[in-house]
Amino acid sequence: MLVELSAVEKLYNNGEENEVHALHDINLFVREGEMVCLCGPSGSGKTTILSIIGCVFPPTSGRAAIAGKKISRLPDHFLCLYRREKIGFIFQNFNLLPDLTVLENITLPLYPSGMNPANRRRLAEPLLEKMGIAHRKKFPVGKISGGELQRVAICRALINDPPIVLADEPTAHLDSRLAFQFMEIMEELKGDGKTIVLTSHDPRVYEHKAIDRVVEVADGRICNTAERV
Ligand SMILES: Nc1ncnc2c1ncn2[C@@H]1O[C@H](COP(=O)(O)OP(=O)(O)OP(=O)(O)O)[C@@H](O)[C@H]1O
Ligand SMILES: [Mg+2]
């Protein structure tokens, strides 16, 4: 199992006046090489679940083991290091830095390791080629198209070759052709052995043939799981 969440609860602003009980008793297990889609209405807790899988923060209580390591009580610093090694996160708004170039954005996760620029480029170039954006590598990210932006975000998520790839509402800003291409890329990554968890209420995502399982979330609880045959 690459992802094991047992009896996971998440409270935002725990103990404060504005406390939000975002997740209740979440039990979710994802096998290596599986592609799972989390569905559900706005505010149901999809991003919160994805953030726990992505080692962005630990659950408030319950057990979360990601790629074999229990993250529930890891101090922030270790959680961050672990995230860098195991997780490729494609954020809903991409979280790219508009003034930096495509190449700089993609290689950003390599800076903390102290890798030299030549080696950073050596890792980035095959990814840029594969995603069809090599001709944009010196462009500032603020000056490229939406579809290209997403492919930059995918390259950045893959630069450390993580076993787990996560994407939050990945097709929200994409037209049909780009949404289709995005799912083709995910299918290819699955073929490479990556474990993938997506959130989406887009049928172009959750009805895609490469999705193994659709997990429905409502009011912070898993209410239905549909396994694809
Ligand atoms: N940082 C935060 N502080 C306080 N409450 C939060 C925070 N992030 C999310 N919440 C609350 O937790 C609940 C779950 O939010 P979450 O973002 O996980 O939902 P979601 O299913 O991803 O929604 P959407 O489809 O709109 O992205 C919501 O009630 C939300 O308002
Ligand atoms: Mg969300």
Image (cartoon, helix red, strand yellow):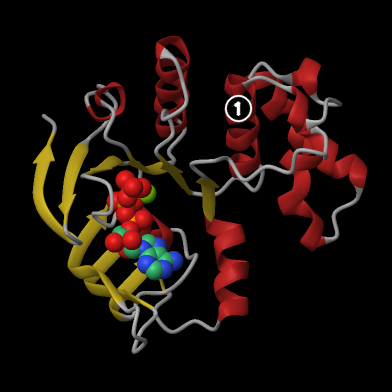
- How many residues crowd mark 1 within 10 Å: few (<14), some (14–19), many (20+)? many
Q: In which quarter of the image is ligand 1?
A: bottom left
Q: Is residue 99 left or right of residue 80?
A: right
Judge by depth and name the residue closer to the eye, 145 or 186.
Answer: 145
In what quadrant of the picture does the C terminus appear?
Answer: top left
Q: Is residue 48 left or right of residue 132?
A: left
Q: Tell me where residue 125 appears, x and y as whole percent.
A: 77, 28
Residue type at tag 1: Arg
Judge by depth and name the residue closer to the eye, 74 or 163.
Answer: 74
Q: Tell me where residue 191 appears, x and y as whole percent.
A: 41, 29
In the image, residue 229 sits, relative to residue 213, either above or below, namely above
Q: Name the residue under label 1.
A: 151
Q: Quadrant of residue 180?
A: top left
SS for dot 1: helix
Residue located 81% across and 40% down the image: 104
Number of marks in the rendered image: 1
Q: Quadrant of residue 147?
A: top right
Q: Can residue 168 be seen from the camera position used here?
A: yes
Judge by depth and name the residue closer to the eye, 193 or 204.
Answer: 204
Q: Tell me where residue 101 appears, x and y as whole percent.
A: 82, 34
In the image, residue 185 sits, relative to residue 50, either above or below, namely above
Residue located 82% across and 43% down the image: 120
Residue located 84% across and 36% down the image: 121
Q: Tell me where residue 219 appears, x and y as whole percent.
A: 16, 59
